[in-house]
Image: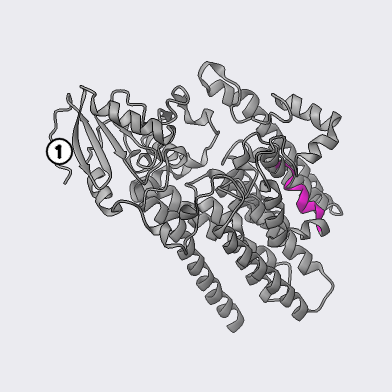
Amino acid sequence: MLKLDSNKKTIGIMMAFFAIVYALISLVNHYTFRTYALDLGLHNHALYDYSHFRFNYSLILQPLFEPRNQLSDHFDLMVILLSPLVWIFGSWTLLIVQIAAILFGGFGIYKYFKNKTTNPSLPLLAMFHFYSIWGIYSALSFDYHSNVMAAMFMPWYIYFFDKKDWNKTILFFILMIICKEITGLWLFFINIGLLIHYRKQKEYRVKSLLFSIISIAYFYSMIRFIIPALSPSGNNYIHFSFDALGRTPEDAINAVLRRFQYVISLLFESPNQGYFAIKTELHFYVLLSGGFALFYKPQFALMLISIYAQKLFHSDPTKWGINYHYSIEFVPVITLALFTWLCEKNINSNKQKRLAFIFTAISFVAGIASLDHRYSVYYDRSQACFFDDRHYKQPFNPTEIHHAINKIPALAKVSAGASLVPHLAMRDSIFCYPYIGNSDFIVLLKKGGSTFPQYPKEFKKSLLELSRDSMYVKVFDENELLIYQNKKYQQVLNFK
């Protein structure tokens, strides 16, 4: 009984510690206006619409795309399920849920390995290892994404699959697959890995094969039929961007079959030699985090086939490395591979514990070191490095910015800078500047915020043009915050 109570206390302390670390990254970013129109603003506006029982037709994507059903971008039903929480947590909803999901995922790792070993230290070290991998810090540094939720449900899916609790297995299968259409492809390879892992047991083989068929059928139907049907003018799936392999999924399959050596080379090299060491950096951090165990447990390596392909064959170099949410799927798979290998390794309990501690310590140090320096392009240290004082600073007072923008009426139509959109998205009409539309207010940060989709020079030029616009009058210009009001808007507001 004492051992169980001690574990509960250790788990609580561990969760509290990492909850604070995660909040210092994600919630501080939101408070200091380092969250953005794409993607938190987009999701927040969808939350708002779903909480009012209507589909979200995004105008935040303008001027990049025409207004489109949010589900035609990514078929993400998780945001619909989470939408009632917006009435409690407002613009913070998805960031809070994302942190809670990560903590929940780590506890799933603990539960899984508690059933796999009599060594009481291994499940706790596996949980700590999971929480410390670089992919979590990277994901938290950049807004909210539903594939993070899917990755955090994965340990529970494996846990209940292993226990043959098929009702709960189906529940977590559904929770994963509705997060994003691409999760269907990942689940296909997860279940192929499970098929190999449990190859000697018929019931497991049958179930894993069934789940893999459902997964790939779901993924194919989404990208071929459902998403194009929801897109304006029946557009094709917009997220297939693998120029090195071809223009279509069929081209990519043909490249794999006919140019296999070239395809394998893309895992390590890039046709664009202007980018150096980004892919190597990913492989390096996978190994440091315990990914070497994938060689000993190749069934888990199979689970990462689609993830490696999505990242390393993509045309956009920002996806190749260790930035953002593009590495989150590595987290549960690496921990599962490493500690499965340790649990099955024929060594005594004390040696198991020492090895687990060493590998966990290396992973923890590597995760922290990754925040200090990266080869991956567009890495913003101030956005991710929670132990750097620049993370907490902006060239303005965030509290005063919040005070001013909170005075904008909820029914007003607003065009806002990318860093302000997530905070102002809880309304019927929200646009991302420079698209103005029929806005009642234009709200911008002169310094310290993102100018996306404009370059800084374009942004400065547009500010000059805005100051000459006869339709709008400047009503606030303090603390790097600009607010313009449409002259036709009747209500007089005091933003000070």
Q: Quadrant location of residue 436? A: top left
Q: Position of residue 117 (x, y in %)?
A: 73, 71
Q: Is residue 298 magenta?
A: yes
Figure check: 396 above or below 68? below
Work out whether residue 430 can be spotted: no
The image shows residue 12 at horizontal and vertical percentages of 51, 71
> Residue placed at 84% from the left, 35% from the top?
260
**Residue 158 in magenta?**
no
460 displayed left or right of 263 = left
In the rendered structure, which segment of residues is drawn in magenta?
297-306
Q: Residue at x 59, y 78 (%)?
A: 4
Give neighbour class at mark 1: few <14, some 14-19, many 20+ (Cα, 10 Å).
few
Q: Quadrant of residue 174?
A: top right
Please give the name of the residue rendered at 59% of the width and 41% of the height, measured from the top-left corner.
318
Position of 175 relative to 65 (above/below): below
- Return the residue nearer the eye: 372 or 300: 372
Q: Which residue is mark 1?
A: 493
Q: Is residue 143 left or right of residue 487?
A: right
Instruction: Residue at 68% x, 51% y: name it.
Output: 282
- Identify which residue, 385 or 255, lies in the foreground: 385
- All told, the count of numbered labels is 1
